[in-house]
Amino acid sequence: MPAARGLAILDWLRERQEEMSELLDRLVMAESPSLVPRSQSAALDILSHELEEAACRTRRLPGDGTGDHLFARPRVRTRPGPYQLVIGHVDTVWPLGTAGAMRHREDGRLYGPGAYDMKGGLVQLVFALAALHELGYEPTVAPVVFVNSDEEIGSVHSARYIRLLARRAGRAFVLEPPAGPTGMLKTGRKGVERFEVVVTGRAAHAGTSPGEGVSAILELSHQIQELFALNDPEHGVTVNVGTIDGGLRANVVAAQAKALVDVRAPNEAAARAVGHAIRSLEPAGWGTTITVRADSGRPPMPATDRNRALFRQAQRLAHGLGLQVDEAPLVGGASDANLTSGLTATLDGLGPVGDGAHAADEHVLLSALPERAALLALLLLEGAPGYDPRALP
C-alpha cells in the first residue's frame, strides 16, 4: 500500500508538470530581492493564494527592516498535536529588472533569477500539499510552513521565528537546492561568520610630509596575508577576504582601511579557533591599531545521527518512487537548516534539480519537479518515532 500511494502521488504530480512550470514562471517574474522588501509582496501573495488552495490557512508575520514572512498551517487541525516544519525563502540575490533578461525556457529547463534558489522548492511544496489534499492523504504529523524574506542576507530578522518553530517541531525540512546535479540531500553544512577588520593609522600629506603619516593600507596588506594564512583545507576551514576599502585620496597617507572577511568552518571547535585567531590580530608595524567586529552569521550544522536517520528515511521513500538520492554530509554554504539542526532533526536540499545558484545560468530541470514534490509529500506523510506532542503554533 505505501508503494502504491507513492506512485499515485507521483502520477498526480506528473500530470500537472506544466502547471508546476507555470507557477514557477509566475514566481520568477514576481521579482523579490532581499534588499527591496516592498518588491516581495507579489510573490508572497501568489504563495498565500496557492497554499490556501491546498487547504492551508496563511498569515503574514511582519519583518523588522525586511519584507514580511509567510506562515501556513493546515486549515483543519487538532490541538494539541505534533507538527513538522517546512522552511523556504522568497527572497533572491538578484536586483529588480533581472528577470526580463534572464527568464527563458530551453531544453526542458526554466532559467531565471531565483528559479533554482529557491522558488522551485516553493513550487514543489505547494504541489506536494495539493497532492495530499486532493488525493485524501492526511499527514498524521501536521505540516507547518514558514517562508522568510531575508534568508539571502543571513535571516537576521527571521531567525527568531525559525528557532521558535524548530524548538517545538518533530523535524524540519528545508527547501534549498540540493547538492550537485544529481540532487543530493544535505545533512550537514559549514557554519559561516563574517568579520570586519578595521585598521587605523595617521593621515599626512603624501608629498610634503609622508614621514608624519602611518599608512593603514600598508598595515592592512600585512593583515590580509595573515588572514589568508588561516585557511585550512584539510580540516574544512576557509577564510576569504572578500572586499577591501580605505584611504581618502592618492596624495594622502591613508588613515583608515578595512577588509570584510568570510569564514566557513565545519564545527564549533574550528569556528571558535579561527574566530579567536582573527580577533587576536596584532599590528605588524608601529603606529596603527586594529579593531575587529564580528557578525555571528549561522552556526555549523554537523551531520548528526538524527539528520542522517532522516536522510535514510528519504532515501527509502525515493527508492519506492524509482529514484536514487544520495547524501551530502558537508557543504560549504549555509542556510536556515543551520538554525534548525541544533533544535530538531533536519534534512536540507529538498529543492529542485537544476544548477546555477546565484549565477547568470540559474535554472531548474522542469521534468524533475514532480519527482521532488512527490518525495516531499511522502516525507510529510511518514511518521517518525520520538515525537513529543505539542500544541500547534
Image: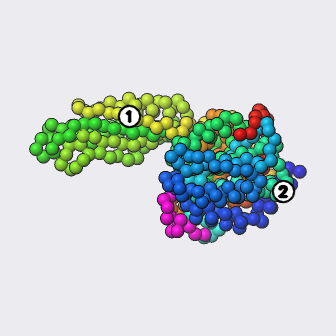
Identify the residue at horizontal 71%, vertical 45% (top origin): 144
Relative image position of residue 73 (x, y in whole percent): 73, 47
- Identify the magenta region: 93-105
Q: Secondary structure at mark 2?
A: helix
Relative image position of residue 91 (x, y in whole percent): 56, 53
- Does 149 sit left or right of 305 as displayed? left
Identify the residue at horizontal 80%, vertical 47% (top origin): 76
Q: Nearer the viewer, residue 253 or 108?
A: 253
- Residue type, label 2: Leu
- Does 66 sit left or right of 164 as displayed? left
Earlier sequence position, callout 2 versus callout 1: 2
Q: Residue pushed farthest left?
A: 208
Image mark for residue 292: 1
Image mark for residue 97: none
Image mark for residue 135: 2
Indicate the colouring scheme: rainbow
Q: Secondary structure at mark 1?
A: strand
Decide: is 20 above or below 76: below
Instruction: Report if residue 179 is visible in the image.
Output: no
Spatial CA distance of label 2 from label 1 is 56 Å
Residue 100 in the magenta stretch? The answer is: yes
Identify the residue at horizontal 44%, vertical 36% (top origin): 294
- Residue type, label 1: Val
Relative image position of residue 81 (x, y in whole percent): 79, 37
10 Å crowding of disc 2: few (<14), some (14-19), many (20+): few
10 Å crowding of disc 1: few (<14), some (14-19), many (20+): some
Residue 101 in the magenta stretch? The answer is: yes
Instruction: Report if residue 73 is visible in the image.
Output: yes
